[in-house]
Image (cartoon, grey):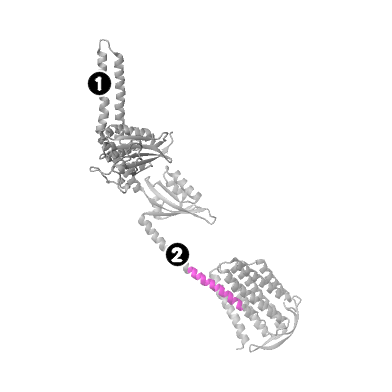
Amino acid sequence: MPGVTILWSMCAAVSLLIAGIHLAVWVRHRAAKSSLALALLSLGVAAAAGAEYLLMHAASPAEFAAVMRWANFAILAMFVGIVWFVRAEFGTARLALGGVAVALRATALVLGYFPGVTPMFREIAALREVAWLGEQIVVVSAATPAPWSWLPALSNYVLALFVADASIRLWRRGGPDDRPRALRAGGAMVAFILLSTSVAMLINAGVLRVPYITAPSYLAMILMLGFELGRDILRARELVREVRRREAQLNESERRLQLAGEAADLGFWYWEMRTGSIWATERARSILGLPASGELTYPMFIERVHAEDRAIVEARIAAAFLDGSGYDAEYRVVLADGTPRWVTAHGDVAAGEDGRPASMTGVVFDTTERRRAELELADQRHELAHLSRVALVSELSGSLAHEINQPLAIILTNAQAAQRFLARTAPDVGEAREALADIVREAGRAGEVIRRLRGMLRNGHAVLKPVDVRDLIEDVCQLMRRDLDARGVRLLRVIADGLPAVAGDAVQLQQVLLNLVLNGCEAMEGNPPEGRVLTVSAARSGSGVRVSIADTGHGLPADAERVFQPFFTTKPDGLGLGLPICRSIVKSHGGRLWAEPRRPASGGADDGGATGAVFHLELDAVEHS
């Protein structure tokens, strides 16, 4: 078969095949505008191939001119296809410049339909047969150029400028695929447009006696553009595979997360601020007392929150969205049957495209049983502290009995004396009045001892009030005065002036100090009488008050924290519960209790430079109301 027929038939066939492929792609994916543009360009190339084949086999100049007019429709379709493709694929095209190129080509097409005129020639006088690629074809041998013969060439140059401009802008954008695409696709289009334009101009000027080769040039162009789109399709398939793989991983992660949530009894939720809708797992709905199905909104959630906790929850949520921080809250919800339930929620705020908080994702879990256990533990701890106070009072019973018996004996003696003064023939009223005053004073002293004792034995929950540290220490020293004398312990008090009050329960704080003082006395039992010195000091410490009790006893174990472990004791008959209870009481007051070795002379003057242990109790200060 002759070469011309083979080559131009192949051009038409391949162009139609490419057009069919990309038209099918566009039908399935309407967003693929580049494929539709390439399909239009390919159809134009196929039509141009057919027109050029007819030009090479025209029987007369009139037939040649008629085919040239119709060929310009194919070229116009190619122009529209190129402009559309560049705009859709590059995203950097100046559409006005492309519109100028299309308008110039359309104008040339219209001018070619004047009588006796083609877009290139006013008149074609004669054709001549030549041998080309093994086949006899006809070419123009004599013709008169049309006045606007420059217009088609100008439209081609404007089209090339349009493509070059878009390619340069794509290159400057500098994305990972932008520069290779600008070189391959943009460079191919500019090169083949200029090649076909140059050949056509030389043919029209009579320099070359060859057929027009627009179709082969543009076929090479659409093959390159098809290659680019093919790369995009392959890349899209890879992305689809990657998305599917990620979806599978996400589903697996979601399944594992769900299993973990079920195992940990967690509920998951997501709140979209823009729409106000809330998504929650089945367990989260159950924990919060929300409907098991259907739409969830913020008002539905907040309505379930206990009325006493609602303001706190709303404030926590507002603060989280205001500064983008995390959300943590423990509150009660009221179920449909009126049953209250404690829940704990944690959430993280995510920002939207504008950088402002847009959503919150979090977990919620039921803490009712934990809260119940904490309350039961607190009651047990309170009861244990009370029993410890009773045991402490029992240990001080001899000293307390003496403290009560002494004023009672004085009261009895003064009462008997008053009776004698009044029984005289001339009653001595002055002496009787003094005896009665002594009775009142000693009765008050006995009443104070009983008041302190009743306070120590009282079993009630702690009530935090402002407590004067100096008065607290004086009360403890008065309770311990007789016991300290019996043990031969010398008490030193170093209390700073102007100490602020601390928030606490006076009875429980007395229990702590009494326990620490007794421990110090027992630690010094093996010392000679002159070496039994106990120092109680109080001073400011930052924003609070620190009370320190230092002894000169046998000291602490290597790990001082061991003394606060339950059932650890250095006493032969000790239970090891006193110090753990003291620390628990102090912790419930928001303070801290710790021990450290006593350095020589740290307790004050005249302690002989002995070593021992010092226990520090630190509490926050409060302002008097």
Residue in the foreground of this view, choosing between 496 and 233: 496
In the image, residue 277 lies in the stretch drawn in magenta: no
The answer to whether residue 325 of the structure is visible from this angle is yes
Q: Quadrant of residue 531?
A: top left
x, y percentage for residue 28?
53, 70
Q: Is residue 470 left or right of residue 116?
A: left
- The residue furthest left is 573
Reply above or below: 119 against 440.
Answer: below
- The residue indicated by pointer 1 is 413
x, y percentage for residue 419?
25, 16
- The residue furthest top is 425
Q: Amino acid at mark 1?
A: Thr
Reply above or below: 622 against 404.
Answer: below
Residue in the foreground of this view, choosing between 352 and 135: 352
x, y percentage for residue 48?
64, 79
Q: Secondary structure at mark 2?
A: helix
The answer to whether residue 274 of the structure is visible from this angle is no
For the residues labelled 2 and 1, the Cα–Cα distance comes to 97 Å
x, y percentage for residue 384?
29, 41
Q: Nearer the viewer, mark 2 or mark 1?
A: 1
Q: What is the total number of numbered labels drawn onto the structure image? A: 2
Reply above or below: 579 against 480.
Answer: below
Which residues are drawn in magenta? Answer: 219-240
Residue in the foreground of this view, choosing between 24 and 244: 244
Q: Secondary structure at mark 1?
A: helix
Q: Which mark is residue 247?
A: 2
Q: Residue at x 59, y 78 (%)?
A: 15
Reply above or below: 556 against 236.
Answer: above
Q: Which mark is residue 193?
A: none
